[in-house]
Image (cartoon, rainbow, N blue to C red):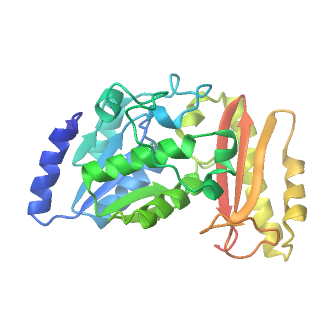
């Protein structure tokens, strides 16, 4: 069922709650791919009812970012959701979520601003205000849907850590479930933004996964110095890559790790054909 109005979805949620059913929320910006489907699958396994939100959230895009260009494929998304047993697709218009305010308006919206330490690094460094937008919309969605569980992909590792922190800090009664990165056979991490890449760009984009895999292999051989590990990346980079960051941080706290350990996550952001791609790897896992 496709719903656009907050009041409509709330009515359905009320009925489910009355029946004692557990609810799972998979928040998305649409352009669904196998990565999202893995979240939906996990939600189906975990919960009695599954809601997928499809909302390209204007307030998490910077003024120079791809908000207008971001792929919008609601019809196909709805079909995929139906085929995969989703009970409700919630696809509100920006006005439904933010009234006449929202982007660039300070007088209507109360923002959720995560702690500076969590946002002043990695993606937050160049995407100023991004995580305020993410946390604000996620909290709104959690308040609307009131799910028992909400499902996020490890692909956006910083996002999950920040959302978990928000949920803990604000005592939001939901359990955040993190699901593994889904990759193409080539190793490219699935992303809605891959649609912007040409075939050649896709090949160049494989460098991200190769860099991370090689770092992990070096770590497993005993190299733990993050400077030495970072240097191994240059063998995979060419003038086609515009590296934004390659960082080593703790997978729970986002604290920098100069010496890598089993709790370290290595995160990379790199532009290929001017498309901003991100990927990450946990060093402690097999
Ligand atoms: O990961 C995303 O697609 C978005 O950041 C999210 C969590 C749906 C919030 O808009």
- Give coordinates of residue 281: x percent, y percent: 67, 61
- Give coordinates of residue 215: x percent, y percent: 79, 62
> Which residue is nearer to you in this view: 242 or 169?
169
Residue beneath the point at 50% across and 22% down: 68
Q: In this image, 114 relative to 85: left or right?
A: right
Q: In this image, 63 relative to 239: left or right?
A: left
Residue beneath the point at 26% across and 56% down: 146
**Eyeballing the image, is 134 above or below 62?**
below
Quadrant in the picture for residue 196? top right
Residue that extends furthest to the top in the rendered view of this protein: 68
Quadrant in the picture for residue 101? top left
**Eyeballing the image, is 207 above or below 164?**
above
**Eyeballing the image, is 185 above or below 197?**
below
If the image is split into quadrants, where does the N terminus sit?
top left
- Give coordinates of residue 200: x percent, y percent: 72, 30
**Eyeballing the image, is 223 above or below 57?**
below
Residue 84 visible from this viewpoint: no
Q: In this image, 286 relative to 176: left or right?
A: right
């Amino acid at each position: 069922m496709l719903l656009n109005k907050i009041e409509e979805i709330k009515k359905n949620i009320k009925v489910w709650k009355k029946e004692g059913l557990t609810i799972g929320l998979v928040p998305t910006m649409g352009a669904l791919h196998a990565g999202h489907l893995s979240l939906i699958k996990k939600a189906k396994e975990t919960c009695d009812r599954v809601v997928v939100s499809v909302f390209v959230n204007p307030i998490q895009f910077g003024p120079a970012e791809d908000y207008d260009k971001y792929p919008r494929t609601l019809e196909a998304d709805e079909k995929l959701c139906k085929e995969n047993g989703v009970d409700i697709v919630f696809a509100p218009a920006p006005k439904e979520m933010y009234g006449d305010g929202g982007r660039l308006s300070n007088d209507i919206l109360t923002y959720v601003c995560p702690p500076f330490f969590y946002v002043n690094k990695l993606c937050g460094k160049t995407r100023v205000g991004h995580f305020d937008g993410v946390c604000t919309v996620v909290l709104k969605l959690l308040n609307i849907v009131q799910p028992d569980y909400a499902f996020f992909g490890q692909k956006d590792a910083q996002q999950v850590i920040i959302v978990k922190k928000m949920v803990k800090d604000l005592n939001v009664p939901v359990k955040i479930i993190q699901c593994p990165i889904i990759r193409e056979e080539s190793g490219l991490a699935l992303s809605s933004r891959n649609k912007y890449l040409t075939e050649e760009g896709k090949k160049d984009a494989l460098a991200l996964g190769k860099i991370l895999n090689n770092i992990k292999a070096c770590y497993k051989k005993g190299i733990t110095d993050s400077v030495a590990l970072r240097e191994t990346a240059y063998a995979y980079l060419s003038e086609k890559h515009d590296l934004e960051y390659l960082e080593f941080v703790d997978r729970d706290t986002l604290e920098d790790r100069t010496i890598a350990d089993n709790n370290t996550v290595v995160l990379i952001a790199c532009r290929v054909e001017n498309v901003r791609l991100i990927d990450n790897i946990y060093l402690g896992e097999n």
